[in-house]
Amino acid sequence: MSSVKKFYAVKKGRSPGIYTIWAGKDGAQIQVQGFPGAVYKGFKTRKEAEAFMAGPMPEWTFKNTKKQELKYDKTDNTVPVPDLIETGKSAGKQILIYTDGGAIGNPGPGGYGIVIINGKDKKEISGGFRLTTNNRMELTACIQALKSLKKPSKIELFSDSKYVVNGISKGWAKRWRKNNWMRTETEPAVNADLWEQLLEQCEKHSVNLNWVKGHAGNLYNERCDQLVRAESSKKGLPPDLNYENL
């Protein structure tokens, strides 16, 4: 029996309602992508979608402080996400990945945070280094997220780093690699070691990178930021050798 989800209930978005397609100008995606706190979910039947629309709003609790602290229950599996998307006449399982990275002082002690959503399963990954940069941690977050997957997968990856998203989506990193990691004729590309790893992972998987605004109420972006801050503050972090040995 097919598990394709043919109805998309947008409970909170630009135009709430039930949609029969995900992508396109008349689909659900445009109603929720980039919309802070969007609530939506895919269903196999209209009856299920209507029940979701009529039901209570999922309870996500934020504590808004200057430090952007977030109350988050990582065992909660009620957050609606589009785990299936339609592509023409076929559909494939889609993994959602949220990443963030940062360094205190830039450069300074830094960390990366990852939330991976695969259907009802959620997984968190984090790590840090004693001396690194914001951009290196943003790149590392994406690399480690993709490396953690056991087999080639279809992925929607969300990052608040335009440096990372544009570097892949606009083909900058591929051009630098083709030019032997030179950004211009006289200027080498920065973080070439990490760009090379990220390109390898993107070529292994089917990855669509999306930019999201940081600190704007996105549940998983906020959680990744929380992981970054926790890792950056740890004592005894290992060295980012490729950075420290420059």
Image: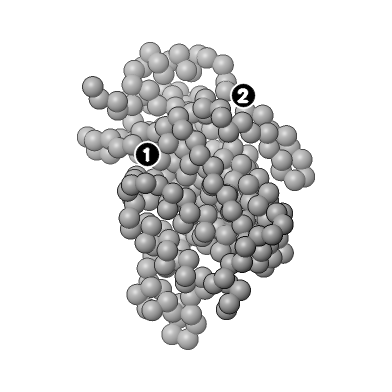
Q: Where is residue 160 in the image (x, y as percent from the top left)?
A: 56, 52
| Residue with the mark numbered 1 | 94
The answer to whether residue 191 shows anywhere in this view is: yes
Residue kind at label 1, given as amino acid type: Gln
Please identify the quadrant where the C terminus is shown. bottom right
Between 204 and 173, the one lying in front of the other is 204
- Numbered mark located on residue 59 in the image: 2
Q: Which residue sits at x=59%, y=53%?
A: 127
Q: Residue at x 44, y 41 (%)?
A: 96
Q: Is residue 57 left or right of residue 195?
A: right
What residue is shown at x 49% (from left), y 28% (from top)? 80
Q: Can residue 103 be seen in this view?
A: no
Vertical comparison of 242 with 71: above or below: below
Q: In which quarter of the image is the N terminus?
A: top left
Q: Which of marks 1 and 2 is nearer the N terminus?
A: 2
Image quadrant in which you'd find residue 128 = bottom right
Q: Residues within 10 Å of mark 1 (few under 14, many from 20)?
A: many
- Compared across the picture, whether 191 is left or right of 21 comes to right
Going by the picture, which residue comes out furthest to the right?
66
What label does residue 198 carry, if any?
none
Residue 141 image position (x, y, % from top left): 52, 54
> Is 7 situated above or below 218?
above
The image quadrant that residue 66 belongs to is top right
Q: Measuring from the top left, give residue 67's x and y in whole percent.
A: 75, 46
Q: Compared with residue 120, is residue 100 higher up or lower down, i.e. above or below?
A: below
The amino acid at mark 2 is Glu
SS class, disc 1: strand
SS for dot 2: loop
Q: Is residue 24 above or below residue 183?
A: above
